[in-house]
Amino acid sequence: MSIAFYNTLSRHKEPFEPLDPGRVTMYVCGPTVYSYPHIGNARPAVVFDVLARLLRSRYTLTYARNITDIDDKINKAAADEGVPIDVIAARYSEAYHADMDALGVLPPDIEPRATDHVTEIIAMISALIDSGHAYAAEGHVLFRVASFATYGALSRRDQRELIAGARVEVAPYKEDAGDFVLWKPSTADLPGWDSPWGRGRPGWHIECSTMVAAHLGRSIDIHGGGHDLIFPHHENEIAQSTCAHGGEKFCRYWIHNGFVNVDHTKMSKSLGNIVLVRDLLQQAPGEAVRLALLSAHYRQPLDWTDDLLQESRRKLDRLYGALRDAPGWKSRWEGADPAADFVAALEDDLNTPRATAALFELVRQIHRSADAEQRATLAATLRASAEFLGLLGADPAEWFTAGSGDALHSADIEKRLAERDDARARRDFAAADRIRDELAAEGILIEDGPEGSRWRRGESSAARS
């Protein structure tokens, strides 16, 4: 079965046919680095990481994800602290990289920064002016929307809706209210670069068009990002890039992930319900956060709750438990193929819920099998499949003993477990039960089996209350 994606431009699921089968190109809008990343920032990073892993299994992929390091929000943050913008951008770029690494997101092949491309941005704006698609006015340069007949095709709105949705500034220097900024003047207290239109800085949309062209070419296979970027950002990218490059098709497949809500409510600073990745990493392993972000189909909204995170951690316990209980898989998994139904799920518009269900079917098969060789082979298939989702990368024994911010250290737990084993050997079951209950209150779950007792971290009674 071939890979198929839902193309936002056509509103249909389409077989993936790259422009050049020898080199697939993908660009994803990355972070604007003015604060710590929240789960809304993390969802596209995780989703398109899975997509990149799938594509790399078939093609040679060049994946670019940019960093926006010049923006009015960055300017404000820098002014508030009295530091240059590069201090703010460096701090929060580092935070973004650290958080995404904790979530198992692999680095893109290329990570361009807007401030490194100002020369190319000025050149693209000049080309748009020369071709009649843009005009200079009072230190600004604006894109002439009326010059691009198919403007609005991506978002499927008419011109009046587009203008209302963009909340555009109706400025006297605009020919039309819907025209958008390519270049804007900078005052002395703001970052700026010299240009034919005076000292200023680029608009957000032209930054991505320029970086795509600089690193991937005039026409690319896949452009991704959050649903909120469809309009105006991606709509404007299409207009700019198509007009700057003589009408060449800018992108073949547009892929957008849905919003992340918190307890059925949209995240916003005004509501105080922004969930930062760095805070979640104090509550659970990054892998649990990642699985939670993949629990809904990428195009659907994801409702974030504490229960979702805990349920994801319990699911990982089951997956890692299957590996732990099937010794011998480690020598086999690197040469193992992923399960056919798992691959089919990802090929069908990156259906991660169905792919995850295929992982648990493998877990059931492992537990049902009485043959040690078969169990090891199935576990190797489980590990090879999970690799596509960026899961099960830890050693199973370490998964069950490692914890983030847990009150008890492994040595303390082992000591208490030895005391319990001694109590059981003396048939002092009351003492053994007391130790078990005390550990459970600290989130340490004991599992008794034919090979002895072992423990894993769960949820403490304090957290449950």
Image: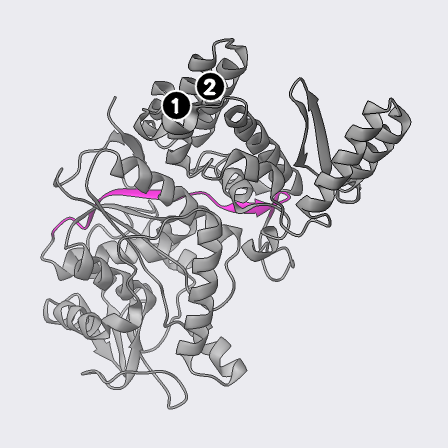
Q: Residue 138 shows which numbered tag?
A: none
Mark 1 highlights which residue?
Answer: 381
In the rendered structure, which disc, 1 or 2, sits on the residue that comes first in sequence?
Answer: 2
Callout 1–callout 2 Cβ contact below 8 Å: yes
Helix, strand or loop status at disc 2: helix
User: Which amino acid lies under the numbered mark 1 shown in the image of this protein?
Assistant: Thr
The answer to whether 36 is drawn above or below residue 292 in the figure is below
- Residue identifier under label 2: 362
Q: Which quadrant, please, contains the N terminus?
A: top left
| Other-residue count near label 1 (Cα within 10 Å), few / some / many at <14 / 14–19 / ≥20 | many
Residue 188, quarter of the rendered image: bottom left
In space, the residues marked 1 and 2 are separated at their CA atoms by 8 Å
- The residue nearer to you, when weighing 15 against 179, is 15
> Can the viewer see residue 315?
yes
Identify the image quadrant of the C terminus.
Answer: top right
Q: Residue at x 77, y 42 (%)?
A: 442
Q: Magenta region: which residues?
A: 248-265
Q: At 51% across and 38% down in the image, what residue appears?
A: 291
Q: Residue furthest bottom?
A: 188
